Amino acid sequence: QVQLVESGGGLVQPGGSLRLSCAASISIFTINSMAWYRQGPGKERELVARMNSGGNTVYAGSLKGRFTISRDNAKNTVNLQMNSLKPEDTAVYYCKGERILTISGYKDFWGKGTLVTVSS
């Protein structure tokens, strides 16, 4: 089993910044792509950002420019830098490892999430 553990969530004021990290139990070089999703209160889970093994990134249109996904190969982590946070960014943020090769074939794995609350 692949484990993904998110950290860095918390309470932040509007306009503030947070940096989330997702630590993987395997080398992120072996993961086709890693992504951040979020699920706000009463909302469906949505893609925030994705980075593939080649370093190519995809962002939700409304978040591009405020959020940045990056990876630290040495630490096996994928990070999400969030700036100019708004109350509507309040959500549980999940890390997802996509198309990871296991003995049972390719599978996706999710972390348990970290709560981000943007409020004054």
Image (cartoon, grey):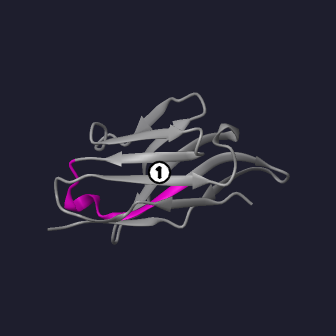
Residue plotted at (50% across, 60% down): 6
User: Which residue is at the far bottom?
Assistant: 42
* Amino acid type of the residue that numbered disc 1 sits on in the rendered structure: Trp
User: Quick one: which residue is furthest to the right in this view?
Assistant: 103
- For label 1, the residue is 36
Residue 18 percent location from the top left of the image: 31, 54
Say if the magenta span includes residue 86.
yes
Single out the residue that lies furthest toward the left.
Answer: 120
Q: Which residues are magenta?
A: 84-95
Q: Out of 19 and 114, give the one closest to the viewer.
A: 19
Camera-side residue of 86 and 20: 20
18 to the left or right of 98: left
Q: Is residue 28 magenta?
A: no
| Residue at 54 percent of width and 67 percent of height | 112
Q: Name the element at disc 1.
A: strand
Image quadrant in which the C terminus is located: bottom left
Residue 53 location, quadrant: top right
Give the residue displayed 34% in from the left and 71% down from the top: 42
